[in-house]
Each structure stands twice: as structure tokens, then as C-alpha cells.
Image (spheres, rainbow, N blue to C red):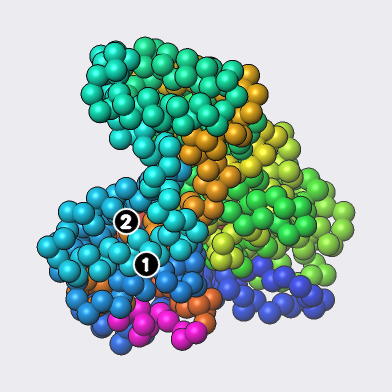
Amino acid sequence: MRVLLIFLLIGLVAAVPGKRSKSRRDTTTPASLHSRKLYLNPLYAEFDEPSKTTIDDLYRLKNLRVLEFYQALNELYLTGGFEKSGTINKIILSQPEIPNDTFHLLIRTLRRTRDELKEGDASLEELNTQLEGTTDSELTQKLLKAVKLAVRNATKTTDAEETSWLQKISKIDLNSVEDLKALNEGNGEDAKLLTDLLEQLKAKLDSGDFKKISSATQNAFYTGVGGVDDVKATVVAGARLVYNMGLENGKEQCVKLKNAVSTDVKFYKRLDWAMDIVKKLNRSDEETGRPGYSYIFESFFDDVAPEGQLIFSPSKLLKIRTMLPLLKDLESVEDLELLMKMLRSVTKDKYRIREHKKLFDSLQDDDKVLEILNEKFELILEDKTTAILYRNILETIAGISVDSAYFNRYVKSVKSITDLEDPKKFLNNIIAASELTRDSKWRDIFQSISAAFEIDKEAQPEVIAPFKELNSTVTGSYQEVFLAMKMLLDGSDSSEQIEAKCQFIDQFFTGLKQRDTVVGAIGIQVEKIHDWTDSTKYIDALVEVLKAADSFKNLNRLLDFHAKYTTVDQKPEESMDLIDNFIIYLEQSSRWNRKNSICGKRKNNSAGVQFFENLENPSLWLI
């Protein structure tokens, strides 16, 4: 009986795009199909139920981190980990056996190597260190050599990067003013090496430029930048800012970073969220060349972001085929205030079940929908086309709402957008970003919006400033700008140290006659750094796959399950659809998603339990 009632209440109310008959409509849409399912979970989900055989085999993996593995596997597909030959994951899987200590060594080495590349360093120092320290293990040596070759091939670099001027000077023990004084006195091997390196550099540069960078570098040790590693990182970060934003914008971005850190000591978390947005929406429009992430930064930081809770918060586990038509319908509404009047009325009125079903059933008649909406909600709609649009929006929201609480959250989301100065621009930007997700899935856009909300949450203007106006100041890569900021943050104990780094960047780069020559002579291949990072981005996902598995044996068990149930041979896009569907199934389950504790019996009435109680007592039914 309960299933029948839910079908009557929600199952018939779904948006139907395209042409419609003049009277009754076909209501078999994705929204209506999935709205018939019941889940006592905190997030309403769209997915196909796994077969009994699949679930039986899944429970054989009950002690493994299956959800985390699949989330990382999805990223591995999205970042091209299966597209190219010679990728590290293929090297790993070709091994007959990998002992646990080697497996975990590999995870650490890959993570640190990837961090080096993100910092603009292709010397592969971590890999070389591990190769030197594992001479007793032939298997480990063979594996690490293959990994090193794969990185070299992907980044199109050679071992020459290990012997650049910057790498040589990094070997000098120079971490304090006392070390600097000792070097200036000419004592020891380090002093001789420094003299030789400076002579080599002097021969390549304009004399004025050489004096300038020498003076700036020496001052850096006295003004609190840090040791030689800090100075090196600051020069690389400064070069990346200048290359991707120009000199003045780059210097200003550094000052914004200092102000943000002095206001929010956990600013690094906001920076991580910003980099996550760039990662997920990095596709560009074919006509304009504009990347998807730029629409999010414009809507949330250049303009005023929606206030209150995360918009469309219940939609996390929905599909883009459901959400995009709703966004487009909302964008096409001329009078959003009038639409809100109808939606608010629905949330406030209390219908008996029979009346509720009767209302939505009557709206299926295209010829009567104008009259019914105007009469029921005291609207002033003038034409049938607008009335049908309002009906579609109402039905779509009802169709994706498992109960009144979910319906209210969607209505509040529409309200927060309506309250913006330019709601149509906001909706246009979200639509544009949605069409530039990596795999045409809603997950990327939802998580990007969530990240933007986290950045903006309880933030002072100084904290938001580093993310504002990037569309007009960044001429290169957002990712490079954020990675440069992260380099400046790493190892900094205070905003004062970041301020010293900003002053060093100013003194080092301002007024150089031959800036590109200086940067190249030092050994910073700033024009190639983005390619190094981009060509190895799949390593981040691979590291998470290996961490989720925790051993080579578990990795093979998880991959065997993937091959059996979520793989279509030679069709990666279809495999990704299966993976996406399976992730949604796992995420909505408290058995597989440890964060999803709102499932089954709970102390306070859950959304699902409250929904059933509303059905038992029609007078409580809110929508």
C-alpha cells in the first residue's frame, strides 16, 4: 500500500522534454522511474540496482575499501590512466607479485614524485633516492626503473633535468645566515661549488641582471624567506606566477595570498578546494576556448554567491540528464518571483493524499494547465507555454524529491538563486559549466559547486580575494597559479614568512632586462611545467587506487570484480557509465559508505521514516 501511495504522490510528476500531446502526456521519464524506488538514505539517488550475483560477489569484498577504490578508479579513467601505453598502472599490473613493503614504498614514491612535478621539479629526486636505497631488491629496482622511464616518457624529459643549475645549487647546505657567512668566507667544498655555479651563471646573464638576482637572493636569507629550499621554491613559484599572470598581477596575487593567510590560518584548505574545481571542470568550450571552471569562479567569487546552504544539496547522486533540463527550464523563466510564489505555496499548503494526487494529475492536461495554475496559486500567467514551463519545473522538483524535506531544499535553492542580482547569469554559468564536465556526469559539477561553497563559507573579503577576477588576470593556467600559491604556502610558518617571500619575488623579478633568459639559465623550464603536471595527473588517482587496495593481492581482487561487473571490453566510456552507476549505489549504502550513517533505524525520524509517517497521517503531508 505504501509503495502505491508513493507512486501516486511522486511517480507521476516528472518533467517531459520535447513535444507534448494536447492532452495527456507520457510520464515515463528518468525522474519518474527512479522516484518509485524507496531509500532510507540521506541522499536521493538515481542508479540501476546491481544484480543479486553482483551483490553476492560484492559481499566477498566486505573487508575492503570498495567505495574508495571505485571513486579512485573513476578518477583514473577520467585522467587518462587507461588511455596511454606505458602508464604506471599497467606496469604495476604486469608484475606477477609485489610484496607489501614494496607496494607501500611504491605508493610513497609515486606520491612524492608527483608532488615534485607539481612543484616544477622534473629531477625525479625521490625516485633516484629510492633506486639508490633498494639495491638489495631486484624486483623493487626493476619496478622503480620502469616507473621512472614511464615518468620520463610522459613528461618528455631526460636525466639532464637532474643536473640543471637549480638542482646543483640545491645540493649546497645553506639553511641559515651562519651557513651563508661561512660560504662568503670561502671555506669548504660548498663554497667552491657555489663559486663555480655563480661563475657559470654570470657568464650567461646580463651583468645588471646578475647583480640584481644575486642581491635579492642574498637578502632573502636575511629577511626570513628561509633556507635554500625555501628560496628555490619561492623563485620557482614567482616564475610561475609571472609566466601565467604577468609581473604586476603575479606580485599582487602573492600579496593577496599573504593577506588571506593572515586572516584564515587554514586557507590552504580553500586552496585545495579551488584546485579541485579546476581539476573537475578543465574542459574548454570549443568555440570560445573558455574552461568550465572559469564559470564557477566567476559566479561564486567575482559575483555575489548564493547565500545560505549549498544549492541543490539533495542532488549529489542524481544524473546530469535530470538536472540539466531543470536548470535550463529555470533559466528560461521570465519572472522568477512569480515562479517562487507557486513553489512557496506548494511547500506551505497541506494537502490530503487524494487532493495532492488530484492536483498533479490535473496538470497533465496541456489545455487546462494555465487555468488550474492561475486559479490554484493565484498567478497571472498569460499563456499556455509559460504555464507548461511552470508545471515542468514543479513536476521535476517533485519527481526528484523523496519527501517534503527534499522538496523544500530544492525550493530554497531556487529562492537563493532568485535573490541574486543577476540570477539568469548565474544559471547560464552553471549550465555552461555542466556542459563541460569531464564525463558528462553531474558529480563533477555538484562537487565543484560544493567546493565553491566551502571556499566562500564564513569567509572574509581578504580570504576570497585570491580567487576573484582570475578570468581577467590569468593569461595562462589557473592550475599553475594555484600550484605556485601552494608552493609559497608550503613550509611557511606565518603570514610574515609569506610576506618575505613576496618581497623576494618583487626584488628578484622586477626590473630584469632579460627575464626569460634569467629564468632559463637558472634551470626553471616554466613553459614546460604545466605539461609535466598535466601529463602525469593520472598518478594522483593511481596513488588513491593503490591506497584503497592496501596490497597487491587486494588490488587484484578488486580489479577482478571490476572486470567482471563494471567493464565493457574496449569501450571505456561504457565502462565509466557502469562505474558511475556503481559508485552511486555504494555511496547511498551505509554498508559501503561509512560517511552515510543515516540509513535504516535512527533516533530522530529520518527523511524516509518521516515520509512514511506523513503517508500514515495525511494531515501531516506537507507537499
Question: Can you say which quadrant of the picture contains the C terminus?
Answer: bottom right
Q: Residue 340 falls in which quadrant of the image?
A: top right
Instruction: Give the alpha-carbon distance from disc 2 to disc 1, as whole Å.
Output: 9 Å
Residue at image position (62%, 79%) is: 28
Q: Find numbered disc 2 in the image and state the secondary structure of the residue it sits on.
A: helix
Q: Find numbered disc 1 in the image and state the secondary structure of the residue it sits on.
A: helix
Residue 290, horizontal then vertical, whole percent: 70, 50
Q: Is residue 562 magenta?
A: yes
Numbered range of the magenta stretch: 560-570
Above or below: residue 282 compared with residue 615: above
Question: Can you say which quadrant of the picture contains the N terminus?
Answer: bottom left
Residue at image position (53%, 29%) is: 203
Residue 104, horizontal then vertical, whole percent: 20, 59
Residue type marked 1? Ile
Q: Which residue is mark 1?
A: 88
Residue 234, horizontal then vertical, whole percent: 44, 28
Q: Is residue 311 left or right of residue 327?
A: left
Residue 485, horizontal then vertical, whole percent: 48, 33
Q: Is residue 326 left or right of residue 407?
A: right
Q: Residue 441 falls in which quadrant of the image?
A: bottom right
Residue at image position (61%, 75%) is: 29
Q: Is residue 347 magenta?
A: no
- The numbered disc on residue 110 is 2
Residue at image position (41%, 79%) is: 566
Bin the neighbour count of mark 2 within 10 Å (Cα to Cα): few under 14, some 14-19, many 20 and up: many
Above or below: residue 115 compared with residue 355: above
Residue type marked 2? Leu
Q: Residue furthest right?
A: 382
Bin the neighbour count of mark 1 within 10 Å (Cα to Cα): few under 14, some 14-19, many 20 and up: many
For the residues labelled 2 and 1, say whether their Cβ atoms are less than 8 Å apart: yes
First reached walking from the N terminus: tag 2 or tag 1: 1
- The numbered disc on residue 34 is none
